[in-house]
Amino acid sequence: MGRCYCGYGAAAVGGNKTILTLIGATTIRPALYDVIVGCGATPGDQAAVFVVQRFTAVGTEGNGFTPVALDPGDPASLADCGVGTFTVEPTYTSNAIVLPFSLNQRAPWRWVAAPGGRIYAPAIANNGLGLKSISASGTAVHEAGFHWEE
Amino acid sequence: MLILPQHLVRQPAGHILVDGQVVADTLQCVHCGAHWVVRPGSRRRRGWCLRCGGPTCGQPECDACRPMEQQLERMERGE
């Protein structure tokens, strides 16, 4: 198994609001294998539709996030993360949704890849995978985490 | 034996957990790499690639055999 890293981000949900991005590099194809989404705000019966989708331009992130190596002995990640609130959304590729899901604000949600089921981002600078809400009945801040392998 | 929805996929490509419990399995398209939750009786059109030997998502773009590796390489070449 390759080197594993994690990224974390938080942003309010709404129409096409990116929470977290995994940005590839020319030197690596990051392989996403774990996605976690939850809401730490006051519990409410709100729902949101999320997608993980490929993008070709990173947009303007709210903050950067230095990926954390799951093995402290590993070198720095070649991939990068971008965290919401994005002032300019990434340029998403149409018809390139790789993981759609809906979520009630009260419940945490997690997707884990089985062996051979990872989602790969291409080895292209500023391309990658973004987790965004495409619609929501509320505007609560949701937190999201990515685990990927390089 | 009680057959639960999360047991309907023989070789899942992913698992969805809510509150720590597996509630569904996903399959992955061998062409575009997209995941979806298997819902028997949903009438969603899915496919199977005989060459790649795996399920396809049913999108028209994935009907022709273009393996995921080939698609990634084409993206990286800028095609």
Image (cartoon, grey):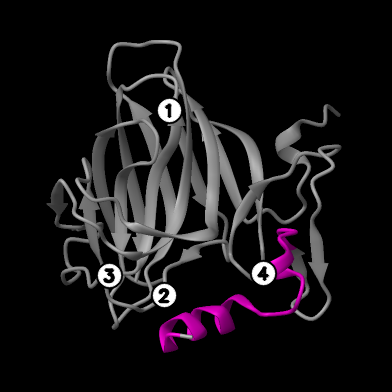
- Frontmost residue, A131 versus B50: A131
- Residue under numbered circle 3: A126
Q: Secondary structure at mark 4?
A: loop
Q: What residue do we see at 32% from left, 44% from top?
A: A18
Q: Residues within 10 Å of mark 2 (few under 14, many from 20)?
A: many
Q: What separation in Å lies between label 4 and label 3 (alpha carbons)? A: 24 Å
Earlier in the chain: of badge 3 and badge 1, it is: 1
* Residues marked 4 and 3 touching at CB (< 8 Å): no
Q: What residue do we see at 79% from left, 56% from top?
A: B46
Horizontally, residue B44 falls left or right of residue B27, namely right
Q: What separation in Å lies between label 3 and label 2 (alpha carbons)? A: 10 Å
**Mark 1 — on which chain does it sit?**
A
- Residue under numbered circle 1: A108
Q: Secondary structure at mark 1?
A: loop
Marks 1/2 same chain: yes
- Residue under numbered circle 2: A122
Q: Position of residue B41 (x, y in %)?
A: 86, 37
Q: What separation in Å lies between label 3 and label 1 (alpha carbons)? A: 29 Å
Horizontally, residue B11 falls left or right of residue A82, namely right
Q: Quadrant of residue A69?
A: bottom left
Q: Position of residue B70 (x, y in %)?
A: 58, 84
Q: Residues within 10 Å of mark 1 (few under 14, many from 20)?
A: some
Circle nearer the viewer, 1 or 4: 4
Is A62 covered by the magenta stretch?
no
Q: What separation in Å lies between label 1 and label 2 (alpha carbons)? A: 29 Å
Vertical placement of residue B19 versus B77, above or below: above
- Residue under numbered circle 4: B30
* Residues marked 2 and 4 touching at CB (< 8 Å): no
* Identity, as a three-letter code, of the amino acid under mark 1: Pro
Earlier in the chain: of badge 1 and badge 2, it is: 1
Span of residues in magenta: B56-78
